[in-house]
Amino acid sequence: MKEYDVIVVGSGAGLLIVEKALAHDLSVALVDKGPLGGTCLNLGCIPSKMLIYPGDRVAEIREAGKLGVSAEVREIDFLSIMERMRNTVRKGESHIREGIGHTENLDFYEGTGYFVKDSVIEINREQIKGRKIFIAAGARPRIPSVKGIEKAEYLTNESVLQLREKPKSLIIIGGGYIGAEYAHFFSAMGVKVVLLQSNARLVPDEEPEISDLLKKEMERWMDIRTGSRKKS
């Protein structure tokens, strides 16, 4: 059984731990079932901003008349926008994989790890032991307990990134920053969007003035319903 100073489970924020451990000349094992890069690269910061950017350009064209500029959006190639985003994610994952392969004192175990005893993890029938083990496995979407949702072909913040055809309409449940970002993008793409938020405010973690202004602006292009709660 191979032993390491540090075992890190998760290649998102976990790579920060890997980097710090290697800087102190420690032996490190990284465990991840893939894709590499964690939430930010694959499901969060990178793909969402790749989509928000063309959404912003559409919004600018809509508002160009205020500046005395006559412009219009004639066509939106939804598939091209989505493929551009997915290609960027794939390239990022490839660069991380290449970097891991060239890093000394770092072994990569690709697969799902299971604890089989104290300080021992098994991956693909191979067991490794760590003096310190860090679990940075990220999070998963929480599916709300809405009656009948199991029968609906619903999307999550993960599966929405795999769309190849633009939906005609969307109901987005949740008015935090993730829900607001996707509402903005899909509305700009010409999708009829209804955003449902249980809180009395949109993006409630922001200052009330920001929340109110954002809701006022976004309501020009979509239906936003705050204070919406499911009926049991």
Image (spheres, grey):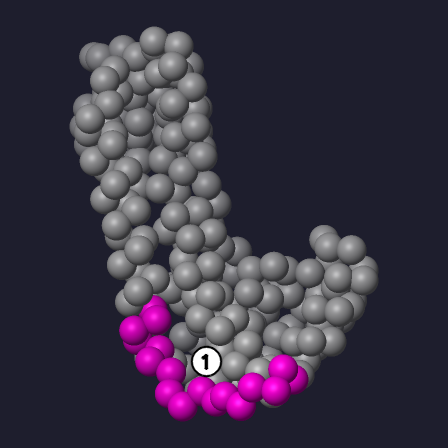
Is residue 161 in sight in this rendering? yes
Q: Quadrant of residue 222?
A: bottom right
Q: Give the residue type that dot 1 points to.
A: Met
* Position of the C terminus by quadrant: bottom right
Q: Residue at x 61, y 59 (%)?
A: 177
Which of the pair 67/15 is nearer the observer?
A: 67
Above-or-below relation of 91 to 109:
below
Q: Bounds of the magenta span?
A: 66-82
Q: Residue lying furthest right in this view?
A: 209
Q: How many marks?
A: 1
* Circle 1 crowding by C-alpha within 10 Å: few under 14, some 14–19, many from 20: many
Which of the pair 148/164 is nearer the observer?
A: 164
Which of the pair 117/200 is nearer the observer?
A: 200
Q: Which residue, given by chain and number where applicable, does mark 1 sit on?
A: 189
Q: Residue at x 29, y 73 (%)?
A: 80
| Left or right of 232 on screen, residue 76 | left
Above-or-below relation of 169 to 172:
below
Percent of width and height locating residue 87: 27, 59
Percent of width and height locating residue 200: 78, 67
| Left or right of 14 on screen, residue 107 | left
Check if residue 74 falls in the magenta segment.
yes
Percent of width and height locating residue 63: 60, 82
Check if residue 132 falls in the magenta segment.
no
Q: Residue at x 29, y 67 (%)?
A: 83
Q: Quadrant of residue 204?
A: bottom right
